[in-house]
Amino acid sequence: MHPIFVAEGAERAIPIRFVSAATWPAMQNDLDPPARAFAAAAGFEARPGRHLVLPTADGALAAILFGIENEDAPRDPFLPGSLAGLLPPGLYRFANDPHDRRLAALAIALGAYRFARYRKGEERGVRLVVPPGVDAGELSRIAEAVVLARDLINTPANDMGPDELEQAARTLAGRHGAQVRAVVGDDLLKENFPLIHAVGRASSRAPRLIDLRWGDPKNPKVTLVGKGVCFDTGGLDLKPESAMLIMKKDMGGAATVLALAHMIMDARLPVALRVIIPAVENAMSGSAFRPLDVYPSRKGLTVEIGNTDAEGRLVLADALALADEDAPDLLIDMGTLTGAARVALGPELPPFYTDDEALAADIAACAAAERDPLWRMPLYRPYDTLLDSKVADLGNVASGSFAGSIVCALFLKRFVEKAKAFAHFDIYAWTPAAKPARPEGGECQAARALYALLKARYPA
């Protein structure tokens, strides 16, 4: 179980009372006179995010007041996540319901996250009794998965290269009894992964394809493909300093599919799971791939390089072609791919693309229920011509500057034919400024929504 959660001990736990502007007048009447007087003297207002520690007569903690939104106002169920950094050490419980007790409890666990690999983190000592009716095991596996993704993304590239990413996959596989195979270095050419090799060959750290399998092969096939660019300089089309600063997060797709894989395997969903990660570093050297180079792909399509900074779609193309050969029931790819997606939707709302209307509706419903924001964008076929090349089957970037995220999705779709359903996610994997339950830094986007989708489609 996640260390913040406790299954028992409600009778000795400090109550957290959720109040809104609408409920505060009645709740004041429920407080004993000293507590009511203290709240008045402290000037407590039941506004979203405000909190007050109520003492007992002898100075101990009596209760916590925490402001949330009115029922008729826009609500953030993750607002209670700020309590993880506000509360004194102790054991707590919900004395009444916030807007969503399950998400509020999860928010406190996610808000307690600290990346402490290089600097000793402050141990807050906050523990929460799992609210009645909430599955403690389910909360824990989701929180653990988010921590896994955040830790991988936050780890700098000097300690998170292709080899370390492979080791992270192997550690996860060992925990759940999965099998992992890796194709490394020049073996990528021998086994027909030319695009992965081309992107990663300039680095002193060997590129690789990581292939994890778990579950009964007779079950429905679910395949996850995650972009694992452990650092992206842009290659010979070098990024400016400001754009390169957080490129340690360019393996966020790989981190997120590993987090989702943990949820699936820990819940023992009845699927045949496959996770494929092309892990590379897009570096610069004499052997770097160049603009206007032309390379074959695993699928047989030739690709002209219009920009070496559009490398993520290249490594995903070979990985998707491999995944597609298996004709999975559901194929999902995920990566930190385009600035165009951020311009269109910002850092908190990743776009996804699919031709499957039922799948799109289910993803949107699960994203809304889990408050894991996603927004469907169109696979607009007329834009396929933007990928035309005069010397190869297609280019890796558009001939113009428009519709960058859509064009990337259309590029990847060229490498998928046999999968029964396919969805592509263009995530950011980063929180630029801290919010409740979402510290600044690496973020696990879309995984909770997709886990909810898979639980509904393939119940354990």
Image (tube, rainbow, N blue to C red):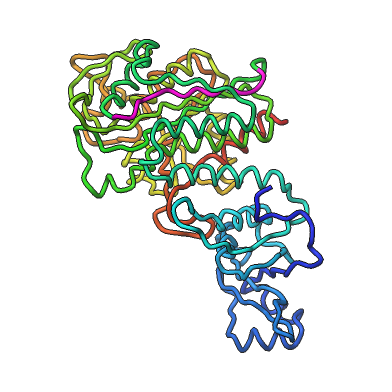
Measuring from the top left, give residue 336's x and y in whole percent. 39, 38
Q: Quadrant of residue 72?
A: bottom right
Question: Would you place residue 441 above or below residue 215 in this image?
Answer: below
Measuring from the top left, give residue 309's x and y in whole percent. 26, 33
Q: Quadrant of residue 221?
A: top right
Q: How many marks?
A: 0
Q: Residue at x 71, y 44 (%)?
A: 137
Q: Residue at x 45, y 27 (%)?
A: 277
Q: Residue at x 42, y 17 (%)?
A: 321
Q: Is residue 254 left or right of residue 56?
A: left
User: Residue farthest to the right?
Assistant: 11
Residue closest to the eye, 79 or 26: 79
**209 inside magenta stretch:** yes
Measuring from the top left, give residue 437's x and y in whole percent. 54, 56
Q: Is residue 337 left or right of residue 128?
A: left
Residue closest to the eye, 96 or 204: 204
Q: Where, quadrant-wise, is the C terminus in this rendering?
A: top right
Q: Residue at x 51, y 18 (%)?
A: 419
**259 inside magenta stretch:** no
Question: Would you place residue 399 above or below residue 74 in this image?
Answer: above
Measuring from the top left, give residue 356's x and y in whole percent. 52, 26
The residues colored magenta run 204-216
Residue closest to the eye, 137 or 185: 185
